[in-house]
Image: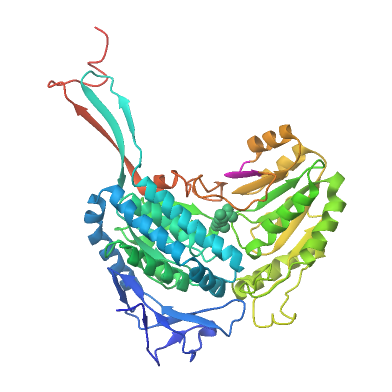
């Protein structure tokens, strides 16, 4: 069965829950190697945020029963998959990486249409998926454990990584190819199977991704896709006793709920919940470089990255000249459909995001002064049917103001001025988050101090706060998450259990800690 069906007349809950008569294709869930409709008979629509009249497709509004079927499939497929030699699992992953590369342009265009990021960034998102697929394919031939000397003669001691079972993968819409790959590739190469629930705003990207995974040759049941709402689908995955590990990226409130539910079952949870990332600009910085880095980090992906720069901490000597350049730069950014090569900044993801960003800008007006932006851009030509908000900079914000503390997830940058490096470091660290940070300086000593002082999982020197590469650990400190890391070898820690193995080849009973004492 193909992944789409023609089903005129089925009930569709879309924007405003009105039935849609749009002719948009309907996609199915992928369970046990088959494309299947939800048992609910209901669907929901995914729309283009640059023009909400454009319906991308309809997707299954799944239930706990659909999730149960997916978990059954993943649990049934698990024993054979975990027995397959890891290098062989890696070979399938290489094929998948090659398919992603082959279909990169098609996927990138579908992504821009479904979630709005500009096409160059969408290509980058797919590239991040390719990179992690190849990295983890290689892990199939490593998956290193340790071999250590035993304290006893004629005894062997080593540790190996073991898979855990069916992994629950719950992903956001802002990196709809990259983040599912960051989670599924390490889970699968280590020998786990997966149940994948994508964000309700990007089910189309998820469907295209899983289609390529099936084509690459992942056996039936190893990868299962269930679309639908967090309350039904997400909760059913998290509460299942048959899913021992959950990996989630998204907002803090949902993350806390997941952690609470999972704690009752003592299951492992890896959470990546965002940031309030700061860029520091010292008086001795290359200002042209800093301006480029700030605009890219604050307004790239319309500010909708966990790693986006939402705070700018400026040493007072360069404050006015930096603000002047940033104002000019931000005002010059072209908003529009990300498929237009001239567009710099795409739309926000949905109406709720527009409302949230607008609300925070109103709060910001009482906490600072708007330098540029501060309003929706939907009155501009061609933008009337999308979720467009003007890139916004607020100045004279205090470090503990709400706009400097709370994650807005939109194109809003709060500027805080300081006198010294020490003050800057203190401001960087005075948030509950700790994902990414950056410093622009030409003083090597200051750069090294920052590398040490900034309490974030990622620190950049003379670059913005975004653009992490897939072969180093990705994640943050404090309330950014649960302390786990994605990407790099560290990603394997989420999806594996350590097993320590002792082999005694002395032929007699040797008691550890007792028979090893000098006589
Ligand atoms: C995210 O926003 O959740 O470093 C991920 C970056 C990207 C990934 C961001 N490579 O900005």
- Which quadrant of the view contains residue 410? bottom right
Q: Is residue 483 magenta?
A: no
In the figure, is residue 396 to the left or right of 436?
right
Residue at image location 34% in from the left, 54% down from the top = 188
Query: Which quarter of the figure is the N terminus placed in?
Result: bottom left
- Which quadrant of the view contains residue 241? bottom left
In percent of width and height, residue 227 lies at 41, 72
Residue at image location 20% in from the left, 20% down from the top = 154
Q: Is residue 367 visible?
A: no
Q: Is residue 150 visible?
A: yes
In percent of width and height, residue 393 lies at 77, 61
In percent of width and height, residue 302 lies at 65, 65
Residue at image location 35% in from the left, 38% down from the top = 144
Q: Is residue 458 magenta?
A: yes
In the figure, is residue 304 to the left or right of 493?
right
In this view, the residue in front, 108 or 153, is: 108
Point out the quarter of the image occupied by ligand 1.
Answer: bottom right
In this view, the residue in front, 517 or 446, is: 446
In the figure, is residue 267 to the left or right of 320?
left
Residue most extreme to the front? 102
In percent of width and height, residue 414 lies at 75, 57
Query: Which quarter of the figure is the C terminus placed in?
Result: top left
Question: What's the magenta region?
Answer: 455-460
């Amino acid at each position: 069965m193909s992944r789409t069906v023609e089903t005129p007349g089925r009930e569709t809950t879309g924007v405003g829950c009105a039935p849609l008569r749009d002719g948009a294709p309907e996609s199915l869930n992928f369970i046990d190697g088959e494309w299947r409709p939800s048992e609910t008979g209901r669907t929901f629509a995914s729309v283009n945020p640059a023009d909400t009249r454009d319906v991308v497709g309809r997707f299954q509004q799944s239930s706990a029963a659909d999730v149960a079927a997916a978990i059954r499939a993943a649990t049934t497929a698990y024993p054979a998959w975990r027995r397959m030699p890891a290098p062989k699992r890696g070979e399938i992953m290489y094929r998948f990486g090659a398919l992603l590369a082959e279909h990169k342009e098609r996927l990138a265009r579908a992504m821009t249409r479904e979630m709005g990021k500009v096409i160059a960034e969408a290509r980058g998102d797919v590239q991040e998926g390719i990179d992690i697929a190849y990295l983890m394919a290689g892990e199939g031939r490593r998956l290193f454990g340790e071999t250590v000397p035993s304290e006893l003669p004629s005894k062997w001691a080593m540790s190996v990584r073991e898979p855990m079972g069916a992994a629950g993968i719950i992903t956001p819409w802002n990196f709809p190819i990259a983040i599912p790959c960051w989670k599924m590739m390490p889970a699968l190469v280590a020998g786990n199977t997966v149940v994948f629930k994508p964000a309700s705003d990007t089910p189309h990207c998820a469907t295209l991704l899983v289609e390529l995974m099936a084509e690459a040759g992942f056996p039936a049941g190893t990868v299962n896709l269930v679309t639908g709402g967090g309350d039904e689908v997400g909760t059913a995955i998290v509460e299942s006793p048959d899913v021992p590990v959950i990996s989630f990226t998204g907002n803090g409130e949902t993350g806390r709920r997941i952690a609470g539910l999972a704690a009752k079952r003592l299951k492992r949870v890896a959470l990546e919940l965002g940031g309030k990332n700061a860029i520091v600009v010292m008086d001795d910085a290359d200002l042209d470089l800093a301006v480029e880095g700030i605009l890219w980090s604050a307004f790239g992906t319309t500010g909708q990255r966990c790693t986006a720069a939402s705070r700018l901490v400026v040493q007072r000597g360069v404050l006015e000249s930096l603000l002047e350049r940033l104002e000019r730069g931000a005002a010059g950014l072209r908003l529009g459909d990300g498929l237009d090569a001239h567009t710099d900044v795409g739309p926000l993801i949905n109406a709720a995001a527009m409302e949230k960003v607008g609300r925070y800008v109103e709060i910001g007006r009482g906490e600072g002064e708007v330098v540029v932006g501060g309003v929706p851009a939907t009155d501009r030509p061609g933008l009337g049917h999308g979720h467009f908000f003007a890139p916004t900079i607020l100045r004279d914000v205090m470090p503990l103001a709400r706009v400097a503390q709370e994650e807005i997830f939109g194109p809003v940058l709060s500027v805080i001025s300081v006198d010294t490096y020490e003050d800057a470091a203190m401001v960087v660290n005075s948030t509950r988050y700790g994902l990414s940070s950056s410093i622009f300086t030409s003083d090597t000593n200051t750069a090294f101090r920052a590398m040490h002082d900034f309490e974030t999982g990622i620190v950049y020197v003379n670059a913005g706060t975004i653009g992490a590469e897939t072969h180093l650990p990705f994640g943050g400190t404090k309330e950014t998450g649960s302390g786990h890391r994605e990407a790099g070898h560290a990603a394997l820690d989420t999806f594996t259990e350590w097993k320590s193995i002792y082999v005694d080849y002395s032929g007699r009973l040797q008691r550890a800690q007792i028979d090893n004492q000098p006589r």
